[in-house]
Image (cartoon, helix red, strand yellow):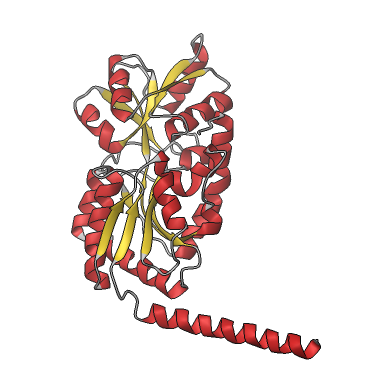
């Protein structure tokens, strides 16, 4: 029996060596055919626009077509699941958001994929900080003013979001808890109607994307008083971050991001090739222009750096969701 086990163990080792050699050989001449880039959201949105520009540049750099496949549905779940269950060979790549790659696991009781076990992180493409905005007629000039106003007003105030579980919802719930004041959450079906009600005075404040808020800011209908994330935006150099405004909580330093991921088990050399191509593509003038138009900041990270920032953000997003009480079906 001992001898049989030794032969069996040797067989396993040889099989492992053979598989490893096969994976290395496969990675050496990767890619040999078209790469499918899955966008788990509808065509025409910001994620899709960036993905198509990225795919065009990566096609040139990889020497094979990078084809966009839109698989929208269920807050990014359908497309993300398809990639998580795909063959780990580098020919199926996900363009994911913070929601699909991180926060969905806290929001949904039953998620058909496990992002940490079934997906491999490749690189963060860009971050998209949000502005804290108020109506132009509001007397609130900064975050401290908003805090004082909410505490001094009977019933607090109301804050809009584009849906339960979105960052505006989570951040407003965190404000209410940490500032010990009442804030009523008003959910909308999209950012556009939320901003229209903010301009109309039906809302006191909210968080908004730069691309959606900018026309109202330029038109003098809204005023931005702070921005999430770690740094100021080039388009709004005078707009302070929350930390610069005296509110350095990790919950306000969070920003949503756009990233590439692959099925878990994809060979490391293949992941490295994808990361390098994406990194080069992000330096193209076309993509830089896209990022600026959409209020995004290009990032570019190695898989290791991505894992580090992901792990650091994990407990913060988990806390934000828990404080909000948001649950989705």
- Which residue of the protein is positioned furthest toward the top in this rendering? 154
Q: Is residue 228 left or right of residue 193?
A: right
Residue sitting at x 26%, y 43%: 294
Residue 139: percent from the left, percent from the top? 35, 16
Q: Nearer the viewer, residue 245 or 257?
A: 257
Residue 74: percent from the left, percent from the top? 41, 39
Residue sitting at x 51%, y 38%: 251
Residue 174: percent from the left, percent from the top? 53, 30
Q: Is residue 230 left or right of residue 114?
A: left
- Residue 174 visible in the shown view: yes
Q: Nearer the viewer, residue 5 or 203?
A: 5
Residue sitting at x 46%, y 29%: 164
Q: Is residue 221 above or below residue 125?
A: above
- Which residue of the protein is positioned furthest toward the right in this rendering? 1
Residue 326: percent from the left, percent from the top? 53, 30
Q: Nearer the viewer, residue 8 or 70?
A: 8
Q: Nearer the viewer, residue 218 or 5?
A: 5
Residue sitting at x 46%, y 72%: 268
Residue 298 picture quarter: bottom left
Residue 162 picture quarter: top left
- Residue 98 visible in the shown view: no
Which quadrant of the rendered structure holds the N terminus? bottom right
């Amino acid at each position: 029996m001992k001898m049989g086990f030794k032969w069996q163990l040797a067989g396993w080792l040889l099989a492992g060596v053979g598989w490893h050699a096969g994976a290395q050989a496969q990675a050496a001449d990767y890619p040999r055919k078209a790469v499918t880039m899955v966008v788990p959201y509808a065509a025409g949105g910001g994620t899709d626009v960036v993905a198509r520009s990225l795919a065009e540049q990566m096609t040139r750099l990889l020497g094979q077509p990078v084809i966009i496949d839109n698989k929208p549905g269920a807050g990014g779940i359908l497309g993300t699941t398809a990639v998580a269950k795909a063959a780990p060979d580098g020919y199926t790549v996900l363009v994911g958001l913070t929601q699909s790659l991180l926060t969905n696991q806290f929001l949904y009781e039953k998620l058909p994929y496990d992002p940490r076990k079934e997906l491999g992180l490749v690189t963060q493409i860009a971050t998209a900080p949000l502005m804290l905005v108020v109506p132009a007629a509001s007397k609130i000039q900064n975050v401290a003013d908003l805090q004082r106003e909410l505490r001094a007003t009977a019933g607090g105030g109301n804050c809009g979001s584009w849906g339960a579980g979105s960052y505006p919802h989570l951040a407003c719930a965190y404000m209410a808890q940490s500032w010990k004041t009442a804030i009523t959450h008003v959910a909308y079906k999209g950012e556009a109607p939320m901003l229209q009600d903010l301009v109309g005075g039906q809302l006191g404040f909210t968080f908004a994307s730069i691309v959606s808020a900018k026309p109202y800011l330029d038109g003098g209908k809204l005023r931005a008083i702070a921005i999430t994330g770690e740094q100021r935006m080039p388009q709004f150099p005078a707009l302070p971050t929350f930390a610069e405004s005296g509110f350095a909580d990790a919950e306000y330093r969070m920003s949503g991001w756009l990233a590439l991921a692959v099925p878990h088990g994809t060979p490391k050399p293949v992941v490295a090739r994808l990361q390098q191509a994406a990194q080069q593509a992000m330096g193209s003038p076309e993509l830089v222009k896209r990022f600026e138009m959409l209020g995004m900041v290009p990032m570019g990270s190695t898989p290791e750096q991505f894992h580090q920032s992901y792990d650091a953000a994990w407990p913060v997003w988990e806390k934000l969701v828990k404080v909000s009480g948001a649950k989705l079906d």
